[in-house]
Every structure is written in structure tokens, then in C-alpha cells.
Image: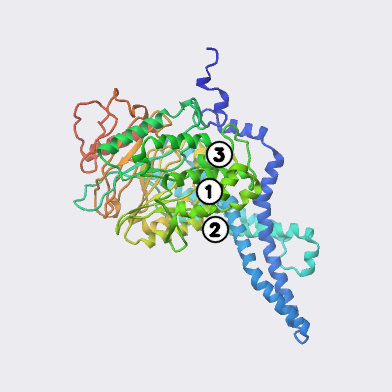
Amino acid sequence: MLLDPRRGDFEDNAASPEQRSLLAIVGSLLVEISPAKLLFAWTVSLLLPGVLLGLAPLVASAWISSLSQHALDLTEMGAALALVAIAALGWFGGRPLIQIAETNFWSLNALAVQPSYAFAREALGHLAERIRRTDVTPAARMRLRRNCSVGAGILVSAGATLIAVLAWPASQWTAGLNDFALVHHLVVPTSANAVVLMSGYLAVASLAWSIADASMDQPVDLATFGTAPSEGSLWRVAHLSDLHVVGERYGFRIESGTVGPSGNGRFNRVLARLAEIHTTDPLDHVLITGDMTDAGRPSEWAEFLDALSCHPELAARIVMLPGNHDVNVVDRANPARLDLPFSPGKRLRQMRTLSAIAAVQGDRVCVIDNSGKPSATLNQALAPHRDRITQFAQHGGIRRAAALRGLFDDQFPMILPPDQNGGLGIAILNSNAETHFSFTNALGLVSEAQTRRLDAAIHHFPTAHWIIALHHHLMEYPMPVKTFAERIGTALINGSWFVRRLQAFADRSIVMHGHRHIDWIGTCGASKIVSAPSPVMGADAAYFLYPPNDCGAGPKALPHGARAGGYSQKLKCCRFSFVQSAEEIGNPAGRGTLGTEGQDGQRDRHANEGPEQAPKETPEEDRKQHHKRRDRQR
């Protein structure tokens, strides 16, 4: 056949970073993007919040000026009544004004300020590591990243200070009521006010962030596992991530393009193998940390839910959360496609994802109030909005989309509460940044509001142990990075800040995520972090189990994930099982696919070497083999 449609073509590689360079994708983006639409999006996302923020001090000063003027003329009854009216207006209008200013401040912080510092930090680090590529040891890489954090903070602070100084002459901080008669005269001053405020904040904050980043513990590989405890409650968890289900039998995935697998055969084999494992050794939970679908399309969600329906015992144990491919991919074939901030497309993808999450776990997980107390199950929380969601899904429209604004974000973090005192809870976060551009769909951000609710929920259950599940990786892994796009295009923008917030309850929690398709277990400070690879993408794709065995004493030996799992009330390390190759899953004619549960926290690395019994390794040999295997993967 001249062109076999089952093998795909260049359209399937349009947005694939594995098939095209970043420069090639950017070039296509610049040629195809709509400048008018991009300008309008920037106006709504950046300029309008900036103008509102810059306008706040002028409005406040005008109100204070008017109040002071009438206070001098209290001898007249009319002036007294005017004073009362103005005071009442300020009382009732002041709080919304403060809320508007605060909202726009944090909006600009998320869109421009924190990304500026993160970009500078990662760019400086990437450049330094490439210059010292041949002699960078893990310890040297850690020191280098600390130094780059400080250097980035100084550079960004200096640049922000310069911008604030240049914008200061055009700023205006006081105004009278008469000034608002000519609103167009205030556009430049309010814009300058916003630039001065945000630049000043960036100048101070970047230094504070850089010092905090440099002084905090950096991510390190987990060197070894401990010994199993003699007592304690144990849980068995399977961790999956980045399934990237497609909606067509011969469909290819955005990232891997035609060099990757087509269809959903690997995913179906993973489910079948997990079902076999569950039959012989029951699982407590199956955690999927995002990217269930490849682009959040209805056909992809239908394929995903149909696959789960064939395994009801697994479906009843699944806990999942949204990934960037579920909610942020505007157009799977066109990275230049842009959604306007009020476009119904983004809201529709959110509602599809929320509906699927509710269908799978809606009666088991709970949303929480600001005190951290579970207020209702997810299905109960969504019930009042059911008609609006279905009407929007059927008919679309900007007005219907606006009516659902905030509904998606308000559900996170949702939690699977611990079933007993000292039990295991799962906190489910949404780490997707508010992007409307296919090219920037992979960026992550955990909001301040969501972090506050997470903190309150964990403190509401003071004896519980927690899996903190999110999609994005918290910080850059302690290993070399091939391309700069991997460091900045996929990162959790405020990851180091979030890690510092997690330290308060690191002694009874473990963080599990996906996103980068990288197999890694490590620590960052007292926090244990597990990164799961994709079970469907790449030749060495894998899924990992967390069986009921724990090991080690003390806070430095808490359970860690992707290959180690289980939980105990003392929160120790665990034994594990794992499948090395996704291609072997569900293949009865192939070699053994499931690593047997080793003793004393050791992994049985010979499980895939055939039916013969493999010799057991010593802990030292196990560590050496682990590092050799990791180096080969790099």
C-alpha cells in the first residue's frame, strides 16, 4: 500500500516534541497564530487586570479626598448627609474594591511574576549544567542549582527594579472625583501604577524566593529501602499515570506522534494485568495521577470509561485527578490554536473531566470547606449544577460558560477521607495552570487557595496518613535534562514554594505525581516524592504497585512510591512489585512480567528473567543495580 493510514503521517506529528524540535514547533506557531486573537487574549489576561490593579489606589484616594472635604463642612446638613452617603458607599464598595485588587494582583502574579523568576532560574541552571556537562556529579548539580537560584533572584530583582524606576514618572497615586470625568487620561497612569506595583513586588519577592530555594533541601534520589515493620496498618496501592487514551483505533498520541503506540491496546493490557493481580492479592486503591486522555475529547473519555467498565472491581478502587492533556489542550493537531479567556472551549473540557471524575469516584471522594472538613461528596456538590452543566454541554455559549466559572477549581482539593482513626486519606489536587494556549498547555500551578484548603484538610484529620496526589512534578529531578523545554515548559511554576508548604506534615504524607513520564523515587527535605512513568508511552513504560509491606524506622525511611509502596501507621518504607515493560503486560507467552515481592524492602529485579528462581541480592548490590539501571534510562 502506498500510504498506510494505520501508520499515520506528518499531521500526527504536528505537535509532537519527540518528532519535531521546539524551534520547528515555534516556527509553525508564529506562522499560523492569529495576531489579533493573541493581542486580545493578552489584553484580557494581562492588560485589563493591570489596569484594574493600577486604578485601585486612584479610586481609594478619590474616596478619601472626598470624605475629607465633606468632613470640613459638617456645619451644613447636606454635607453631613453626603458624608454619610460617601462613607456608606466606601464601606460597602471598599471590600469589593479590595477583592478586585487582590484578585488581579494574584492573577498577574501567576501569569507573569512567578513565571519570570522560574524562567530565569531554570534558564540559568540549564546553561550552567550544559557548560559543565562532563563533570557534574549529583552533589555538584545540587550546589549548582542552589547558586543558580541565588543568581536568578539577583538578576530578576535588578531587572524588576529598573523597570519600576523607568515606569515611576508616568505613575499617579492620587486623584479626585473630577479626574474620573476623563477616564481615557487615566489609562497611562493606571498602567504605570500596575507596572510599578508588580515590578516592585517582583524585585522583593524574587530575592526572597531565591534565598528560600537556595536554603531549602534539594531533591535527591532515594538511596535505599529499609526493613519491614512488625506491626501497623498497611495499604496496597497501584500507581498509574499518563494513560493518554485516544479516541480512535489507530489514533496516535500528541507527544510521541507516529513513533509511539497507536490505539489503546497497552492500556487495556494494563487493566487486565491489574485485574489479575487484584484477584490474587487485592488492591486497596488504584491511583491515576492525571492525563487519562490525550486531548480531553469526548471520544477519548468514552474509550477510557468503556475500558473501566470491563473491570468493575478496579473501577471501584480508582482515584484519579486532572492532567494538562485532560483540560488544557486546545487543539491536538495545532499548537498555534488559542482559546480566549472567556471561550467556552476550556470550560467544556473542564466539565468533561469533572463529569468523568464524578462518574468514577463521585460517591467516594468529598469536597471540603475552608475549615478542612468534608462538606459533601463530589456527586452531592455537583447535583445543584447538573442542569446548567448539561445545558452548557448541549448548547455551549459564552453566557452558559460564565455561569460555571469557578465550579471546576472549587472542587479541589477533593479528598478520599481516611476510613478510620490513623487511616489512609488521599488528597486530590488540580495542578494545571490557567492556560488557553496549546503551546503552553503543560504548565502547572498549585494555587494559594487550594494549598490552604489542603493544609486545613490534613490538620482536620490529625492522626491520618496521606497520599498527596497531583499531576505535575514538584521540582526538577536530580538528573541531567536534555532540552530546556523539559525544564520550563512542563514545570510546576511554584513547585519549590509548594514543597516548603508540604514540610509541615511530611512525616505522615507521601507525594505521588506523573506528567513527565519519568520513573523516579526520591526525597526533598522530609517529603517523599514518587514520579510514575506512563504505562503506554515509550519502550520502557511501566506501572508500579505498592504492596502491603513496610520497612525502616524514623522519618527518613517513610514510604515512597512508584516502586515502593504500602503504608503503615508508622509511615515506613515498603516492598514493591513492578512491571518492567508495557509490551509484556498481559502477554502469557512472554517472560514473567510481575516482580515478586522481595524481603526487607529489596526489589526482585530478576522477575522478568524467566521462570527460574533468581538469586537474592544484598542491599548493597541492590543499590548498585538500581543506579546502573537509572543511568541506562538516562
Classify mark 1: residues with Cα within 10 Å, few (<14), some (14-19) or many (20+). many
* x and y, in percent, of residue 617 in the image: 21, 36
Q: Residue at x 67, y 46 (%)?
A: 41
Q: Earlier in the sequence, mark 2 or mark 1?
A: 1
Q: Quadrant of residue 329?
A: top right
Amino acid type of the residue that numbered disc 1 sits on in the rendered structure: Ala
Quarter of the C terminus within the rendering: top left
Q: Earlier in the sequence, mark 3 or mark 2?
A: 2
Residue 472 showing in the rendered view = no
**Residue bearing the label numbered 3:** 329
Residue 205 circle label: 2
**Circle 3 or circle 1, nearest the eye:** 3
In the rendered image, the residue lying farthest to the bottom is 75
Residue 313 position, x and y percent, is 34, 40
549 and 287: which is toward the camera: 287
Residue 219, image x, y percentages? 39, 47
Give how far apart the Cα atoms at labels 3 and 2 are. 31 Å
Mark identifier at residue 176: none
**Which residue type does callout 3 highlight?**
Val
Q: Name the residue beneath numbered marker 1.
A: 118
**Tag 2 secondary structure:** helix
Residue 20 in the image: above or below residue 121: above
| 316 to the left or right of 442 | left
Task: Kindly tell me whether residue 40 is visible in this rendering.
Answer: yes
In this rendering, the answer to whether 471 lies above or below 534 is below
